[in-house]
Image: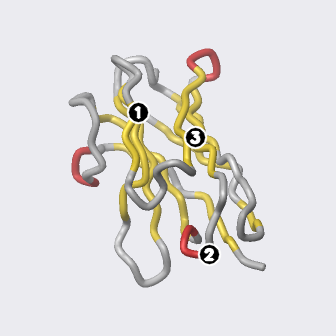
Amino acid sequence: QWQLVESGGGLVQPGGSLSPSCAAFGCTLDYDTIAWFRQAPGKDREGVSCLSSNDGFTYYADSVKGRFTISRDNAKNTVYLQMNSLKPEDTAVYYCAGGYSGGLSLLLYEYDYWGQGTQVTVSS
């Protein structure tokens, strides 16, 4: 059974960087797509980025393109989201999701397994 555990969130000033991670247990990330979503207070959960493990292709939401990078460490069974040039509007709880094997997708309903989330706050 999949278990996803996020860590590495925190408080950072605008323009700063964070790199939350998502460790997977009871599964391997080798064959499925893994994605990051976020949910700001009072807003719907939205897709941020995803990585297709089969071919290594990645996809980013327009709002984070050029600032965020998703990557995977197979040896640690962990996925990372390097976030640079952070803005106050990036403030949200960040979730990783897995269990989808159809390629690149940022649709919530495609994913069967979710982590508990890690808070990212961008504020001066």
Element at badge 3?
strand
Front position in the image: 106 or 117: 106
Q: Nearer the viewer, mark 3 or mark 1?
A: 1
Q: Quadrant of residue 5?
A: top right
Return the x and y of residue 14 as percentages of the image width and height. Answer: 72, 70
Residue 41 against residue 50 in the figure, above or below: below
Q: Which residue is mark 2?
A: 88
Q: Are marks 3 and 2 in contact (CB under 8 Å)?
A: no
Task: Inspect the image, locate mark 3, and give the three-letter code of the amino acid beneath it.
Answer: Cys
**Distance between mark 3 and mark 1 Cα atoms:** 13 Å
Taking the spot 35% from the left edge, 31% from the top edge, the residue there is: 33
Q: Which residue is mark 3?
A: 22
Q: Residue furthest bottom?
A: 42
Front position in the image: 52 or 16: 16
Residue 43 bears which disc, if any? none
**Distance between mark 3 and mark 2 Cα atoms:** 22 Å
Other residues around mark 2 within 10 Å, as few (<14) / some (14–19) / many (≥20)? some
Q: Residue furthest front?
A: 66
Return the x and y of residue 8 as percentages of the image width and height. Answer: 71, 50
Residue 72 against residue 59 in the figure, above or below: above
Location of the C terminus by quadrant is bottom right
Q: Which residue is mark 1?
A: 51
Location of the N terminus by quadrant is top left
